[in-house]
Image (cartoon, helix red, strand yellow):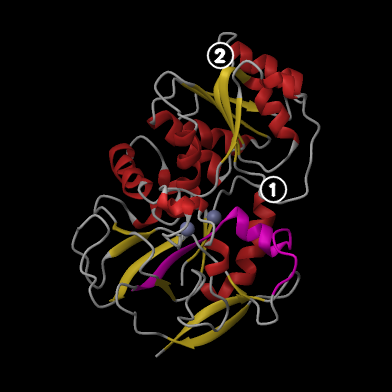
Amino acid sequence: MKGRVVVFKGVGKPFEIQEYEVPEPEPGAILLQITQAGICGSDLHTYRGELYQAVPEKGMVMGHEGTGLVYKLGKGVSTDSLGKTIKEGDRLMYSAIPACGRCYQCLNGNTNWCSNLFSMLKGVGEFPYFNGTYADYYYITPRQPVFRVPDELPNSVLGFINCAMGTVTEGLSRAGCKEGDYVVIQGAGGLGLNATAMAKDMGAHKVIVLDRMEPRLKLAEEFGADHTINVEEFNTPEMRKKRIMELTGGRGADVAVELVGRAELLVEGVDYLTNGGTFVEIGDIVRGKTVAFDPSTMLAGKKIMGSMMYRPGLLPVMMEMMVKNLKKRPYTKIVSNTYPLAKVNEAFKEAEWFNRQTAVSRGMLVP
Ligand SMILES: [Zn+2]
Ligand SMILES: [Zn+2]
């Protein structure tokens, strides 16, 4: 039996759909039948040629975010990572990070900072062939933690958990977001909406969200934003800072999170902080952008930290938080567009366009 795999051949070239033999999972592995595969911001950076110097001649497999059904369990697998029974047909959430488990960072629990992560990723045509989520199947290695999806969660809220939601939750949690905090979110796309909801559900007293598109800001309010600032209206950093100081009673933000990917927002975000506050850089994943920065602005205990992906233990926590808050937070609105796998070229064209023009937050391939 064969299955389809989407192959990226380089900037400006159409995606190719190739077919490969569906493998038997090795002991400890799981073959997942993909039901949703998200088009993440980093996939769009790859598509634009901003992340990699060169694409291998064979092309690249793509897609890391997503979910699916257990298609086949490898020998020895009968439960998820928490010991819950899993069987064929069950809905499964997996950690998108196949960390090595042996490097210094992994041994200290920071598997999202695994030193060997990128060198271990497999390419086009390499066994087990289904190495990305833009495909009919996805091969979950024995190194990747998996979690059975709680019955209460509808399918429409699952596709973005193991990248968009995980990434912002990790950032907020590493920054120590807690009860009583004032949190500023720069950007109200898929990441920003998840960050807004999570910050509120982690106890933030006020969440203030900035974006340039009114429909996205409206959506941020539905996700729990206490205040929104349209940067077209408040169109200088000075005006925005003044507004944030008003909204926080003159204190400033305890946590500010950058989810847009513009270097100058680091300078602006640090300026929003109260003394001792933390700026979290997540959006700037493309190398080579620089900005002038005055280090003296940090002296009163302000911190700048970067954050990437998530520790897998957050996955079951987030799913339980979603079960608890499902009525309060319109998670079903995060995925705005779905496309069959065969329409992957169209999906990327639209996601690219949508990200600049409309309130669309996440495109999803549904094989
Ligand atoms: Zn991602
Ligand atoms: Zn490692």
Crowding at label 1, few (<14), some or many (≥20) Cα neighbours within 10 Å?
Answer: few
The residue drawn where x is 27% and y is 58% is 81
Report helix, strand or loop for mark 1: helix
Q: Residue 73's spot in the image, x, y percent?
A: 27, 75
The reply to whether the C-beta atoms of the residues labelled 2 and 1 are less than 8 Å apart is no
Name the foreground residue: 142 vs 32: 142
The residue drawn where x is 70% and y is 48% is 356
Q: Can you identify the residue that label 1 sits on?
A: 357
51 shown above or below 343: above
Report helix, strand or loop for mark 2: loop
Identify the mark at residue 47; answer none if there is no mark: none
177 shown above or below 336: above
Give the magenta-colored segment's residue range. 30-55
Q: Can you identify the residue that label 2 sits on?
A: 248
The stretch drawn in magenta includes residue 237? no
Q: Residue 3's spot in the image, x, y percent?
A: 45, 84
Could one spot residue 191 in this view of the protein? yes
Question: Which amino acid is tagged 2?
Answer: Thr
Q: Residue 337's spot in the image, x, y percent?
A: 53, 57
86 shown above or below 7: above
The stretch drawn in magenta includes residue 52? yes
Name the foreground residue: 54 vs 219: 54
Question: Which amino acid is tagged 1?
Answer: Gln
Q: Earlier in the sequence, mark 2 or mark 1?
A: 2
Farthest residue, direction front? 104
Farthest residue, direction right? 292
